[in-house]
Image (cartoon, grey):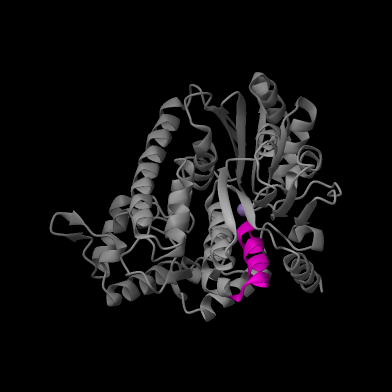
Amino acid sequence: MTIQAFKEFIKEKASKFNPESIRIVSHLDSDGISAAALLVKLCQLKGIQHTLSIVPQLDENKLIELSKEKDDFFVFADIGSGQISLINHLMKDKQVLILDHHSPEKVQPDPHLTHINPHNFNINGSQDISGSGVVYLFCRAIHEGIKEFAYVAIIGAIGDVQEVSGFSSLNQEILQDALNSKKIRTQKGLKIFGLQTRPLYKLLEYSSDINLPGISGSKSGAIQFLQEIGIDPKNGSKWRKFNDLTGEEISTLITNLILKRKNEPNPEDILGNRYLLMDEKHDSPFHDLKEFSTILNGCGRLQRPTLGIGALLDEPNAKRHALKALAEYKSEIVQFMNWFREERGKKILEENNYVIINGQNKVPSTMIGTMSSIISKSQLVKKEIFILGLARQEDKTKVSLRVSSNDDKINLREILQTITKEIGGEAGGHKFAAGAIIPTDKEQEFINKAKKILKKII
Ligand SMILES: [Mn+2]
């Protein structure tokens, strides 16, 4: 019922959508970039003029700035639901449409504002639909031609970590559109991180998400295992990667990994879904939608989101440059992960159940969330731990909170909101990945309060 009501609501709002030109304002991550690409496509299909801004977040200053622009019609995508009262107040003279899936601020939108958000229909916006998914449903209600691009919303959902052994609810419906359009196909594959990039033995050695007895954490164990099952880990002097394996070798590998795990609760848990773009060659980085999503994040973090949009709209030049951005992004990540390792025991604060990284001006604000996520998923820290990252962004400080735990009761957004309510700033995000913007002179106070709260949980 709720899904039906949500779709009816979207349909009704879509039927009234008839602007000559729009200003698209979207979020600087894979989901936001995917959302923007869908809106650009809709504008192309409908002959609507458009301009575009991609922003790291929507705060008061940004809204004041936007309100002074000459545009009459704004579409906020994957962003805006947390700022209803600011938008009510600051953008009175504009038409505003919000297409978002973040937890909304509990405020009635003024008549100049149309707010479309799954949470208002009891649909779980952290899992069942992404920002680009909401945009997709809206665009689909206006023009059927957008169905060709359903896979773009799948990339966005993957970017927001909504794919957990498949998709649920509205995401599942969008996936069906993507499959029907024959743009993508799905395939069961190994779900080990770094499949495209790491040498095979490292892939197995660093398999932090899944346990491979005798192999996880052991270089010699990984190499010996490969030799035992008849897969040469090397080709001449070069370490082989997963992509170098033949089809037969891949099935041998998978069978033997499952055998190795015969005493684990779910031996087959090494297999996950892959979503593959039919038009891309099998060795193209754009072939696998998970990898595509990483490329979009790279474009965003390097402040070149339009390359990501171009890549989604299949522009060869943009795709070429997006790959360069990905390479740069990866080397930046390596650089800041090295910084993290060097500063342990120095600037990094570690206690039983938290790690606090105060990056100040040393870590870019566009990198701190990614770093916190990577650390929380890595073997650098133990399980059941919070990762709190801070970094300066112009005259403010950006905060990211992650957790490596499967405890359903933990709600990171609420933790950050509790603190910002006391010391100022704005918090948003999701249960398992949340962020905030605080005044820089409150950094220390924020850290002190966070320590107290985090100590009490887990
Ligand atoms: Mn999102």
Judge by depth and name the residue closer to the eye, 370 or 379.
370
Q: Which stretch is magenta? A: 130-144
On the picture, is 435 further left or further right than 90?
A: left
Q: Is residue 168 visible?
A: no
Q: Is residue 195 left or right of residue 273?
A: left
The spot of residue 385 in percent (x, y) is 60, 41
In this rendering, the count of numbered labels is: 0
Q: Quadrant of residue 286?
A: bottom left
Viewer-proximal residue among 107 and 176: 107
Q: Find residue 117 and report its horizontal and vertical position in percent.
A: 74, 58
Q: Residue furthest left?
A: 236
Residue at left 77%, top 43%?
Answer: 93
| Residue in the picture at 75% in, 70% down | 11
Does residue 15 show up magenta in the picture?
no
Q: Nearer the viewer, residue 178 or 86?
A: 86
Quadrant assignment, res 165: bottom right
Q: Is residue 422 left or right of residue 262?
A: right
* x then y, percent, for residue 355: 57, 33
Task: Please identify the quadrant where the N terminus is shown.
Answer: bottom right
Residue 20 lies, with reference to residue 335, above or below; the image says below
> Is 133 part of what is drawn in magenta?
yes
Asked if residue 317 shows in the view, the reply is yes
Q: Is residue 427 above or below residue 17?
A: above
Q: Is residue 85 above or below residue 437?
A: below
